[in-house]
Image (cartoon, helix red, strand yellow):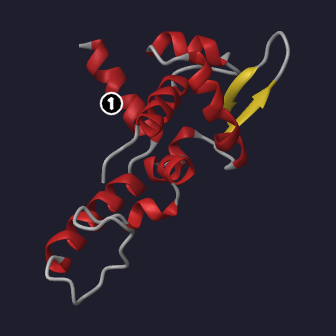
Amino acid sequence: MVYSLTTKYAVIALVELAGRNGPTPVREIAQARDIPPYFLAKLVPPLVRAGILRSTRGKNGGVEFARDPSEVSLADIVRVIEGEEYFKECVFELFPCEGDPNCPLHDVWDPVRDEITRFLTETTIKYVADKLATVKET
């Protein structure tokens, strides 16, 4: 399970957004985190469709969370960007794997994949933002 640059940018941008109040222009988030603004702008529509963000136009427009960042897991973001198949990835196969019990590596990889999926599901954007804010304060 390798994370694409797109997924990394989405997570980084959402962590940045979690520390802000109200609608924030995409270019402001991009500038704060060194993300190409045109690239970040392309990530907004799928995140809006997934109900993670809402977007408003106009002078005071921008993006903001559609639901509390404590309700948005890393798994939610990975699903939007990578798709559900990401959680079926096998490091030993080219195609998504359903956990074939006949595979000689099934007992090795499945527990690792399950633990990664658990971590992504239980870890929220708010948690990551709070942890990073604590590090910046020290």
Residue 30 on image: x %, y %: 54, 16
Query: Which residue has dot 1 on it?
Result: 131
Q: In the picture provided, is 120 more to the left or to the right than 80?
A: left
Q: Can residue 49 be seen by looking at this rendering?
A: yes
Residue 127 on image: x %, y %: 40, 38
Q: In the picture provided, is 38 more to the left or to the right than 133?
A: right
Quick one: quadrant of the C terminus? top left
| Quadrant housing residue 21 | top right
- From this view, report whether residue 123 is shown above or below residue 59: below
Tell me the residue at 30%/54% (across/down): 1
The residue at the far front in this view is 94
Tell me the residue at 47%/49% (across/down): 78
Assign a secondary structure to mark 1.
Answer: helix
Q: How many marks?
A: 1
Q: In the picture provided, is 65 more to the left or to the right than 123?
A: right
Residue kind at label 1, given as amino acid type: Lys
Residue 45 on image: x %, y %: 70, 38
Residue 134 on image: x %, y %: 31, 22
- From this view, report whether residue 134 is shown above or below residue 48: above
- From this view, report whether residue 70 is shown above or below residue 131: below
The residue at the far right in this view is 58
Q: Residues within 10 Å of mark 1 (few under 14, many from 20)?
A: few
Tell me the residue at 52%/52% (across/down): 76
Give 48 or 90, whichever is nearer the viewer: 90
The residue at the far bottom in this view is 102
Q: Can residue 66 be seen by looking at this rendering?
A: no
Tell me the residue at 16%/79% (across/down): 107
Give 115 or 39, whichever is nearer the viewer: 39
Q: In the picture provided, is 117 more to the left or to the right than 9?
A: left
- From this view, report whether residue 114 is shown above or below residue 77: below
